[in-house]
Image: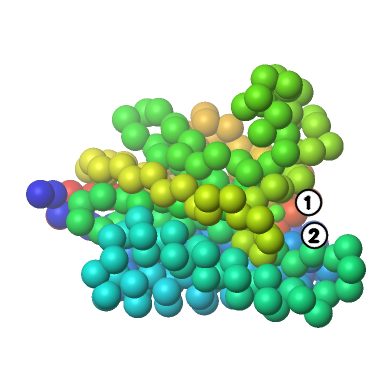
Amino acid sequence: MSDFVLRVGSRSAQGIRPNNEDRFVVDLTQNLFLVADGMGGQDRGELASGMAAEIIPQVLHERMAAQDSPEQALRQAMAQANQAILDAGQEQPEGRRMGTTAVVAVHRDNQVFVAGLGDSRAYLIREGKVEQLTVDHSVAQALVASGALTPEEARHSPYQHVLHKFLGCSNMGDGADVSPFEPKAGDCLLLGSDGLTNHLNDEDMLDGRARFPDPQDWADHLVQLALSRGSRDNVTCVVVTFEQS
Ligand code: CA
């Protein structure tokens, strides 16, 4: 059984948008990390991502205290946040939606449990390789999975940012998928909103990790890099490094 020291860097930038609809959570008492990217008119996006950032850690805490497994607790937390955001969106005018993505990671029992809804992403950076741990719930990605689009076509598709699964969605299907991995010393976990991940490739993630030993400097660098490449969105990232204690 390995014990790790987790070191974390986090940053959220409004960019050129009139408001910041991204939210993040770094909770080192629960070893919980979250990025949420809200959508909706006026202040609705911020309200939705704020609700996700509040409800998910709270439900996880309650469910794990009640001896639920981390998978069950995560799925329950996502389901409760979904319902609360749906309820809050009831007074929205017809055709307007209120919702948010959420990508969540919890380190527990020498495993990291990752769940995502929407198109915010989690990546594992291990031994010089980058692995995307989450699937984008965009219509374009679903068309790639069915063979109707190539990944390259999907990048330019008008459906790239149309989500079919997110928090505040009336049909969640079978809910959030939870995938665990066993961390190794030297691993890095990166959570990001699409304002970040649309502008970075694998080399950027590997190169930054090598150059910035302090995770906070690394997070600052990644956000700055996305902005310098013309991200017109809110840009958010949380990076977690696993170091042998
Ligand atoms: Ca976004």
Label placed on residue 232: 1
Q: Position of residue 140 (x, y in %)?
A: 72, 34
- Mark 2, residues whose alpha carbon is within 10 Å: few (<14), some, or many (≥20)? few
Front residue of 213/66: it is 66
The relative height of residue 164 versus residue 96 in the rendered view (above or below) is above
Looking at the rendered structure, the secondary structure element under dot 1 is loop
The answer to whether one can see residue 116 in this image is no
Say left or right for 171 vs 3.
right
Q: Position of residue 41 (x, y in %)?
A: 84, 69
**For marks 1 and 2 on the same chain, the one whose residue lies earlier in the sequence:** 2
Q: Position of residue 31 (x, y in %)?
A: 32, 64
Label placed on residue 16: 2
The relative height of residue 230 versus residue 50 in the rendered view (above or below) is above
- Badge 1 vs badge 2, beta-carbon distance below 8 Å: yes
Front residue of 2/41: it is 41
Looking at the rendered structure, the secondary structure element under dot 2 is loop
Cα gap from disc 1 to disc 2, whole angstroms? 6 Å
